[in-house]
Image (cartoon, rainbow, N blue to C red):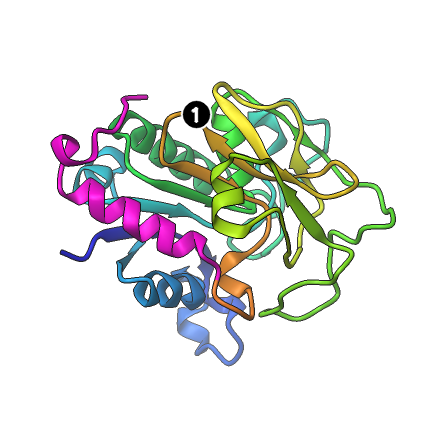
Amino acid sequence: MKPLIGITGRRLSLGMVARTSRPFQFQFIDSYFSAFGDSVAAAGGIPVNLPFHADAEGVIDRLDGLVVTGGQDIHPSRWGGSARVDPTVDPRWDFDVPDPERDEYEAALIVAALQANIPLLGVCRGHHLLNVVLGGSLVEHIEEGPIVHVSPNFAPDDGDDAHTVSFAPGSLAHTLYGPRRVVNSWHHQAVDRLGRGLAVMGTTADGVVEAIRLADSPVVGVQWHPEWMASPDPVFEWLVDQSAANALGPAMTGGATW
C-alpha cells in the first residue's frame, strides 16, 4: 500500500502571478513546489498538498507521513529573535516576509505529527520550524565566510564542493549519505540552540547545523533542499519507507510515542 504523505505550501495573492486577469488579482492561491510531489511519488509515495485550513489533527489522522517545506523566515516572535518585521507588509503579496498564519498551521501540524509518531521531514524552513516547535532557537543571520550558504546557483543543483556536510558516525544521516556529501544551499538562517530531544547529525566545516533528528523517532530535518538536488536524494526513500511501515500500524512498526 502506497503511503499518503502530506506536503505544506504557501498562500499568495493571485495578483503576484504575471498576466493574471485583473478581476481575480485579490483572490488567494495555495502554491506548492512540484519537485516535492515528484520526489515523493518517485520514491513510491502518494503526495498530498495541504492548504492552511485543513485541520492539523484531522489531517495527521489520515496521513502516513509529512513534509514541512522551505520558504520565508519564521516570525522572530516565535523563538525570541530580534529582527524587526514591518507589520504593513502583507505576506500574501511578498514572498520573503514572515507569514504568521503559515507558522501557526505548520507548527500545529508538527505537534500533531509528533504526538501521532508519524514520519516527518523538515526541509530548510521546515528544519528550522521543527527546532523552534521543540523549544530551540535560530541563528538570525549567518555572516559571510568561506562557505557560501546563500548560493547564487539555480535549482536544481547538487551544490559546490566547499558546501560539504559531514555526518556523525552511527547517525541515520551517515547511513543514508556516508561520512559526507556535497549539498545545495539557499539559506541565511540556521539552527542555533537545539530543541528538546533533537540531536545534530550533520554540519558544514563552519559549524552550521545541516541535519537533525529527534531521538527514537522517524523525525528528521535537513537544511539543504533534497527536492532540488540534481541527483536523487535518499531521504525521500527513507521517508516513504518509514511512512509505508507507519501505514501498517503501530503493531507492525513498533514506533515510540513522542
Reply yes or no: does residue 235 show up in magenta: yes
**Label 1 residue SS:** loop
Q: Residue at x 17, y 44 (%)?
A: 247
Q: Position of residue 58 (x, y in %)?
A: 19, 37
Q: Position of residue 234 (x, y in %)?
A: 44, 56
Q: Nearer the viewer, residue 172 or 50?
A: 172
Disc 1 target residue: 215
Whether residue 224 is situated above or below residue 100 in the rendered picture: below
Q: Residue at x 55, y 49 (%)?
A: 91
State which quarter of the image contains the N terminus.
bottom left
Reply yes or no: does residue 116 show up in magenta: no
Q: Residue at x 31, y 33 (%)?
A: 113
Q: Position of residue 50 (x, y in %)?
A: 31, 51
Quadrant for residue 150, please give it.
Answer: bottom right
Which residue type carries mark 1? Ala
Q: Left of 134 or right of it: where is 29?
A: left
Q: Nearer the viewer, residue 138 or 65?
A: 65
Q: Left of 216 or right of it: where is 77?
A: right
Q: Nearer the viewer, residue 46 or 141?
A: 46
State which quarter of the image contains the C terminus.
top left
Whether residue 110 is situated above or below residue 198 in the rendered picture: below
Q: Is residue 126 visible?
A: no
Q: Residue at x 55, y 65 (%)?
A: 229
Q: Position of residue 10 (x, y in %)?
A: 45, 53
Q: Is residue 111 visible?
A: yes
Q: Which residues are magenta?
A: 233-258
